[in-house]
Amino acid sequence: MSKIKSFSLKPNTRIGNYRIIENIGRGWEGEVYKVVEVPTDAVRALKLFRTDELDSIRHLVHIAWYYEQVRTTNHFPVYYHYGQWFLDDDNGCWFLVFEFIEGESLKDRIKKNTHSKEDIFFSLASALADIHEYKYAVGDFETLENVFMSIDRNNSQKIVFIDCNPGEPDHPNSDYKEDCLELVTISKFFGKSKPSRVKSLIKEIKSRKRFGNKTLRKIIEGL
């Protein structure tokens, strides 16, 4: 699916109580900006959607609901609220406001080759297992562009999914199998020389016919 048309908002443009700093990403449903909250000066991430490009307002509310639910996993940015705004050249837009995540994507970390690829891979797998145990799945992370290594309040590193597939209204994403298969795809970055633990995890995933919310955790613990 192609990316949406950019809003092309310039720095200092106001969206509700937020002032644009810069564009930080664009996908097939919305565009994300780094913003400052007025008047608190708190830095946030604001995801903007055109009304006529949304599947429905109900779908937007579902996305907000999903992020509220997965907050307890500690692997997603904090969701704050949603709102509506009008720009001069459209029929209105909606926005979601999130915690702004500092850090770098796993894709960039792997490119720099300054960290153990095996450690990165199993940190990702463990984060997915954490989320599955809450009976949610992630999806759409296999490029590793939307998966960040961030620092939590205890100064420890943690995996954060800044974007994902939340599913549909009344049917939140719980496709544990698809998440595990995306891990298999990601393992290709090792090339032909996969570490033995990675090979074992991939073998276990491929041998499973049914996936529950504790399957990935059991596979990891059994390695």
Image (tube, helix red, strand yellow):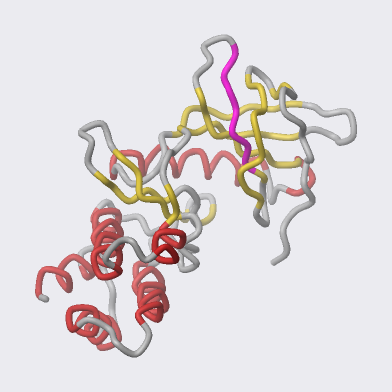
Write down the region rendered in magenta: 32-38
Is residue 71 rendered magenta in the image?
Answer: no
Find the residue positioned furthest to the left: 222
Percent across and percent down for residue 215 are 21, 70
Percent across and percent down for residue 123 are 26, 60
Q: Is residue 220 left or right of residue 212?
A: left
Question: Where is residue 71, by image quadrant?
Answer: top left
Is residue 124 depicted above or below 81 in this figure?
below
Percent across and percent down for residue 78 are 41, 34
Q: Nearer the viewer, residue 202 or 112?
A: 112
Q: Nearer the viewer, residue 197 or 70?
A: 197
Image point 78% across, 41% down: which residue?
7
Q: Nearer the viewer, residue 125 or 188?
A: 188
Is residue 63 depicted above or below 191 in this figure?
above
Image point 24% across, 54% down: which residue?
130
Question: Where is residue 74, by image quadrant?
Answer: top left
Is residue 35 rendered magenta in the image?
Answer: yes
Q: Nearer the viewer, residue 203 or 144?
A: 144
Q: Is residue 108 left or right of residue 113?
A: right
Is residue 219 depicted above or below 61 in this figure?
below
Is residue 45 depicted above or below 132 in this figure?
above
Percent across and percent down for residue 144 are 46, 62
Q: Main secondary structure of the magenta part?
A: strand
Q: Is residue 126 left or right of residue 91?
A: left
Image point 42% across, 62% down: which residue?
112
Instruction: State which quarter of the image contains the C terminus.
Output: bottom left
Instruction: State which quarter of the image contains the N terminus.
Output: bottom right
